[in-house]
Image (cartoon, grey):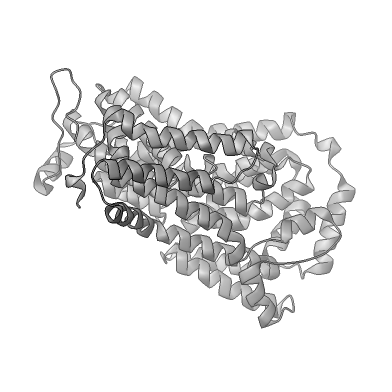
Amino acid sequence: MSDEQHTTPILLLALTPVVLTLMILGTQIFYFGVFEPHIPLAIGVALTSLVGIYLGLTWLDIRAGIFKVILVALPSVSVLIVVGMIIGIWIASGTVPTIIYYGLKTLSPQIFLAAGMVICAVVSVSLGTSWGSVGTVGLALMGIGEGFDIPMYWTAGAVVSGAFFGDKVSPLSDTTNLAPAVTGTDVFSHIKNMMATTIPAMLIAFLIYLGVGYFVIDSQSVSFVKIEAITTSLASNFTISGWALVPALVVMVLALKKFSPLPSLFAGVVVGGAFAMVMQGQSLQAVFDYANNGYAIQTNIVEIDTLLNRGGVQSMMWTISLVLIALAFGGALETTGCLRSIINAIKSKAKTFASTQVAAVGTAFSTNLVAGDPYLSVALPGRMYSPVYRGMGYSTLNLSRGIEEGGTLMSPLIPWNAGGAFVISALGLGVSGGNLENLLYIPLAFACWTAPLIGIFYAYVGWFSPKATEKEREEWKSTGAKIAKFNDDGTPVTD
């Protein structure tokens, strides 16, 4: 059954599985105090399927829709697997320990958060993947922050701000290419248009982190005995050398030469494995074990053991299972027409450009919230709102920026989203173990949530909100792009 044949449910029916699932999810996380969203989301799949069957769909129709969404997002699952390998291997190769060692020797607590954000942003732009940046450089920064006695949630907030903002403006990033593709613009115009919100948001975040470093974090309380113990232990268990950074440099060079992120990261696994054997004296069997099960070390220094005993494909299975179930929920919502009904309801309330921009950003965020997938949160509103912007005479560059900010940037701030689940797992925040205070990284990832607010502000005052050019209008005509018609009250005609 095609999408056009689906019966779109009324809004109340469409909201029912969403609201019930969020209630069950909230009970699991906040009442029971257990961060395991898997079963609540699986129940959400069942509830949404019942709605679909009530509307006349068969289970085979719903299953096909679920698998379709999962198939689209399988590249992200592949990245999770490779990043799991790379974490274990880069610890064994000495790459992560070397970054921690030199970071503790050269950085100061005052500038650490601001510098960490910038480092993650640069690496993420180079690699084109926020997840790769979080799992490698971000992990090392967590170790440096631990040495400085900086709370994990502050360090995680800075890492997320830098990594996901770098991803947002990298021409190598999948979501940065997806957003202009679904809205009918080109990637470089899209990146240029995003600078109006990117630069202020990054500057605000940088100044906040710098201010926190100088006025909130008590550098006097930093234990230099603890730092010395960490660096001494690292030096005694690993060969600390600039050569250990070669695996990271290889990945960055391949990315800059426009190799896809997945083969570039896997090359980092291979080179890292070779360096683990040559520099650190590891056996081939041990390297295979680290890639699958993660690195293991016992130094009797809690900070090092907690940080370095991680990685491997198996460590990502909790996250991968969550991502797959969340994708199934999103696929069921899309196949049954529930998401379409909700988006149409939001879209029908937008009568001005500013309210349409708010609706687009809000829809991308809401899709992230209920569907758990950053790809769907970019693609779905991108497809549905493009005709509205064209009908209003505005460039769809406004839309591509809005869905990137509501989609890409907000995904790590939703714990059961693919982005949020990965951040929690890769950075070792221990939320599933009951350390819910580490969820404070969400409001502390300033760059991620200030950008959408700046974009909405621009929409209301008319700044950096380009109208469609004659070239764009001609392109719409030549490609037969859909252009929305409007009702007498100014609202767009819904699908």
**What residue lies at 23% left-to-right and 33% top-to-bottom?**
389
**What residue lies at 56% left-to-right and 60% top-to-bottom?**
317
Which quadrant of the figure has residue 223? Answer: top right
Across and down, in percent, residue 294 comes to: 66, 66
Q: Nearer the viewer, residue 69 or 128?
A: 69
In this view of the protein, can residue 165 be seen by the observer? no
**Is 20 on the left-hand or right-hand side of 487?**
right
Q: Nearer the viewer, residue 329 or 307?
A: 329
User: In which quadrant is the C terminus drawn?
Assistant: top left
Which residue is most to the right? 225
**Is 490 on the left-hand or right-hand side of 407?**
left
Q: Is residue 183 above or below residue 314?
A: above
Across and down, in percent, residue 351 comes to: 24, 21
Which quadrant of the figure has residue 349? Answer: top left
Q: Is residue 32 above or below residue 461?
A: below
What count of labels does the image hold? Answer: 0
In this view of the protein, can residue 10 be seen by the observer? yes
**What residue lies at 14% left-to-right and 23% top-to-bottom?**
487
Across and down, in percent, residue 177 comes to: 34, 52
Across and down, in percent, residue 146 comes to: 76, 47
